[in-house]
Image (spheres, rainbow, N blue to C red):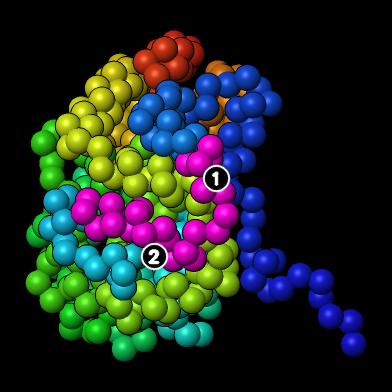
Amino acid sequence: MQHPILSRKAERFTESVIRGMSIEARTHGAVNLAQGMPDFPAPDEIKEAACRAIRDDINQYAITWGSKNLRDAVAEHASWHLGLEVDPEREITVTCGSTEAMLVSLLSIVNPGDEVILTQPYYENYWPDCVIAGAEPRFVPIRPPHWTFDPDELAAAFNDRTKAIVLCNPNNPTGTVFSREELEQVAALCRKWDVIAITDEIYEHILYDGRKHVCIAALDGMRERSVTVSGMSKTFGVTGWRVGTILAPPNLSWAFRQTHDFVSIGAAAPLQEAGAVGYRLPRSYFAGLSAAYQARRDRFCNALLEIGFAFDLPQGAYYVMADFSAFVGDLPDDESFARHLVRDVGVAAVPGSSFFRDKPLGRHLIRFCFCKKDDTLDEAINRLKSLRAIA
């Protein structure tokens, strides 16, 4: 009997659209506003700490679930920032980025046939994560204005087969920051149906207009059924370091640690020591992060509005989902528009449909990121000004 070379899971995957657009940007010399990676320096304190750790020969395996120094620092950060008292010995797992953290969480709790609720649009890795873990995804739309969910549609997605719900908050790709009231609605359904809430909070320190981050694990009755995923990438501008974290109760953390061990063994030891320095930076650093990103948001989004794009102003994270209908012309969809932008205009962005399983819902949308230096944003703006709105 001839067996197929590829697994049925692998056959379902395609190239990451986000990473693919970064390749297009390099090919065509475009400004890369597709992939969410800053082009400005990381804090000197953590760079120096990483170099110091390497020089001090912290170059062998750390404890597979994370160095003690980093776990202690993450617990201290969780106390003042999230309002959670976390045991660093039993409730924190350090992973190779938040991407591995999400996959490890799903692999550890999902059995074949279990359902996992995803909002739509969603960060493009979540659906493949469900496929790898053997979950059946159920999609709940979040819609403008403000990119939030309808409580009745959300409630209808829960049933006896629901094992988990995945929320990205602040949200990639929409820039939504879910309110305490909205998270309470999710929490009530999790308690009713005995469902685990997995929250991707990687943008937890990037919020605008005075908003405060609310961690669903801190809500009443949610501590024992919440998995909080985050990491260093966005808070410290080190997307290439791949140091993620999972905060979860001991019974879940035990399983996560075993799965993580066999998936990757552990994150880079010297970078974990640098992470311990990062999480202990003065609180003024974290406040300044939001202020700096808000200035970038305002600079870029004001220009997009003047050029002719339509969108809801991002409340957090560093992306804007923009409607490009004013420029359609003879370009039939978002993929054609994205190709036009990167090849002819010189700006790389992500086609909106890549964030939807129901592709038609994103055919009029494009996602830009604005985690860039002012000079980079200004160059992108100048290039985008060559677009002409249709009368």
| Quadrant hosting residue 244 | bottom left
The span picked out in magenta is 53-77
Distance in Å between CA atoms under marks 1 and 2: 23 Å
Q: Which residue is mark 2?
A: 93
| Helix, strand or loop at mark 2 | strand
Residue 10, percent from left and from top = 67, 66
Residue 317, percent from left and from top = 30, 40
Label 1 vs 2, first from the N-terminus: 1
Residue at far right of view:
1
| Helix, strand or loop at mark 1 | loop
Asked whether 106 falls inside the magenta stretch, the response is: no
The image quadrant where one finds the N terminus is bottom right
Q: Name the kind of residue labelled 2 in the image.
A: Thr
Q: Which residue is mark 1?
A: 57
Q: Is residue 77 left or right of residue 55?
A: left
Q: Name the kind of residue labelled 1 in the image.
A: Asp
